[in-house]
Amino acid sequence: MAESRIRVAAAGDIHCDEQARDRVEAAFARVQREAQLVLLAGDLTTHGEPEEAAVLADAVRGLEVPVVAVLGNHDFHAGRDREVVEVLRGAGIIVLERDWTVCEVAGARVGVVGTKGFVGGFPGANIPDFGEPSLRALYSETTVEVEAVDRGLDAVADCPLRIVLLHYAPTMTTLVGEPEGLWLVLGSHRLAAPIAAHRAELVLHGHAHEGTFEGSIGAVPVYNVAGHVTGRDFWIFDLDLAGKEVESPAH
């Protein structure tokens, strides 16, 4: 029988490299005792080098709790993102790229829909589907990300807890604190449409280092779990199977 509550550990923007090895290994050693599922909201590496990904892989290898991740913009910087993904998957990390997975956690099915997200902005300052091909290509890239979220949420519709894992923000409510001139490249309001339509139980993202921890898309809670925002290695969410946050202890 499934438990009525599960504990999910979330972090974004951990920016692994060799200098961070001790910190990362210690954090993952602790989190295995504190949570039943680990979610990583992108920027797993500092510059997108496979050697940096190996630091995270070494910390995760052998953990008994599932670890699900999406990539962030830093993970693409070196143009070696395929190698980064291969290293991470080799350590057992479920890397979602416009995809979804179902994790069995404490006897319950938890659906995680994961993709990086992309830029586009928010009402009042957003990229339109108009003009030069290069500008319209940005719009099209975000469209593919939006469609992936919609498709994933449809696939996990029968799960009692559905979590959307992103890097870029789907709402400006978690960007408050960042200069508004940067919001255009910190996320897109278009990502919110499928989340609202499917009424996901929880959304997690990173990227906005100076943003706000807690926001929403309608009644759907959204959290910016970038380490720069939470001030800790992981934020632990104590959730019931309807997705309602029961308690969020300081970890």
Image (tube, rainbow, N blue to C red):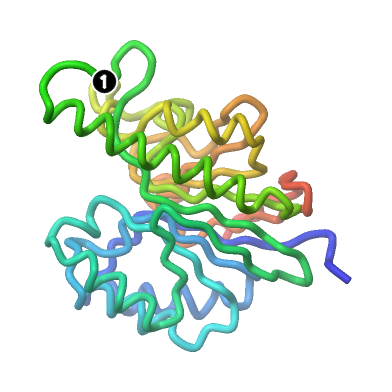
Residue 16 versus residue 214 in the image, above or below: below
**How many numbered marks have been drawn onto this rendered protein structure?**
1
Which one is in front, 53 or 113? Answer: 113
99 shown above or below 142? below
Q: Position of residue 134 (x, y in %)?
A: 12, 30
Query: Which residue sits at x=44%, y=85%?
Result: 61
Residue pictured at 67% horizontal, 60% vertical:
110
The reply, left or right, for residue 105 in relation to residue 12 is: right
The residue that disc 1 covers is 129
Image quadrant in which the C terminus is located: bottom right
Q: Is residue 16 above or below residue 122?
A: below
Q: Determine which quarter of the picture holds residue 145.
A: top left
**Residue that protrudes farthest toward the bottom in the picture:** 62
Please report the residue visible at 49 percent of the width from the left and 43 percent of the height from the top. 149
Image quadrant holding the N terminus, namely bottom right
Residue at 29% of width from left, 21% of height from top? 180
Q: State the image coordinates of residue 102 (x, y, percent, origin top left).
A: 62, 64
Identity of the amino acid at label 1?
Asp
* 71 relative to 103 in the view: left or right: left
Residue 154 lies left or right of residue 108; in this view the side is left
